Amino acid sequence: MYDRGLTIGQSVRTPILARLLWMVLVLVFALSQSPRAWAQSSGIGALRDSEIEALIRDYTIPILEAARVNSRSVEIYLVNDTSFNAFVANGQRIFINAGALMQAETPNEIIGVIAHETAHIAGGHLARQREALSRTRAANIIAMLLGAGAIAAGASSGNSDAAQAGSAIISGGQNAALLSLLAYRRSEEAAADRGAVIYLNATGQSSKGMLTTFNRFADQQLFSSSNIDPYFQSHPMARDRVSALEAMAETSPYFDRIDPPALQLRHDLMRAKLSGFLEHQDTVFRRYPRSDTSLPALYARAIATYLHVDVNSALTQIDVLIRAQSNNPYFWELRGQALLESGRPERAIEPLRKAVALAPNSGLIRMLLGQALLATESSGNLDAAIAELTRALSSEPDASVGLRQLAIAYGRKGDIVRAEMMTARAYFAEGNLNRAKQHAARVQSRAARGSPLWLQADDIINYQTQSSGG
């Protein structure tokens, strides 16, 4: 598993503040910025993992086809947040929280979430949100954000006066604008629910997973609904949604259809993997006790063991996984990753090559193999490392980890121009345009004018100039 920017801001529990921060997130960042800038601005970390991404693609493609949405134009992002949430932002991009994947017990639950978000894309809801936002005065938006900031400051410090001041800022003439926007959003949520049922029926899948999700939200609201204004929310109240959805879902001939066992196993392995990597080791071992001998439980414990206990013991556990599924590339990947991160890159190469052979289209696994080859610090592995990293980056062009590894490899070969170019691209991928421009300028000072490298550097320099002037 690869991860980026895993420092997540403190969760906000106040219902009104959660809704306001939704406004900040969706209406300001998601509607106007690139995914890279959006993620940096919001402080949200993106998770990368070949196994999970492959599974989510398998969940998503049939739904997109049913909605007549080009699957190649839709990007899926995994967000390092433990809450159950998913949303569409900035065009055809679906963001799914790790918490949603971990809490959903069946594939059908996540497929229902994906169907709902796909309906937002197919319905053009984001474009209409931009129109709705444009009808709201900029002063109103600023007041909302200032009020949200004041409430957040009061909530974090325990200062009730600050929180009340924030509420006053919002209510002082801005409340109507906010309620109008949220009411607009609620109508689209209801439309997305209807669209999701249509797509699930078209693919012969049950809507029961959506009901499970909505019931979860409804149960949570039982403890706080007396303090929530149902009109001060971006989504309809959960019980209302459950009632409306039941009327549609239960008429489907596929309502009682369950997920195929093989797909359920992949889903369970995904949940175990996320638990092993993201949860505290004590939580992992409670959730997957040693008495549980299932493959997902072995997977979670092996990951937690290699991260927190003992790598050699973890390798023994990973070997059990490999014997159970010798053609599972992700078990071989885990073995290679454990060896690489424990300082044994020479031994990591063989399992990673096996993983690449089993999953040749995974740029992330190939990138890990390139890292292992480079980490041996053997001149005999240098060209192979460059070849693997270059091929990996052809499918993962914005992977800053791979770009930086390739920069190191070119530096060792004495190819300083290419090393500078890879460094510039890495900074660009991370959104650090100032540093990207500095290294791109160094490329242009060394490369022949008009050469491919010079032109790549020129693209970065011009991109920043256009952005700063726009």
Image (cartoon, rainbow, N blue to C red):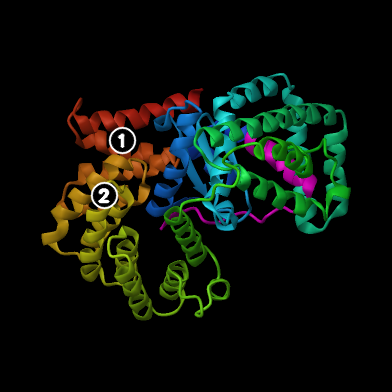
Name the residue at 30% across, 57% down.
368
- Circle 1 sits on which residue? 441
Evaluate whether residue 187 shows in this view.
yes
The earlier-in-sequence mark between 2 and 1 is 2
Position of residue 413 measured from the top left corner of the image (x, y, whole percent): 15, 52
SS for dot 1: helix
Determine whether, in the image, residue 239 is placed left or right of residue 130. right
Q: Is residue 399 magenta?
A: no
Determine whether, in the image, residue 347 is placed left or right of residue 12. left
Residue extending furthest toward the front? 253
Name the residue at 20% across, 37% down.
446
Residue at mark 2 to residue at mark 1: CA–CA distance? 16 Å
Mark 1 crowd level (few <14, some 14–19, many ≥20, 10 Å Cα): many
Position of residue 464 measured from the top left corner of the image (x, y, whole percent): 42, 30
Residue type of the residue flagged with mark 2: Ala
- Circle 2 sits on which residue? 407
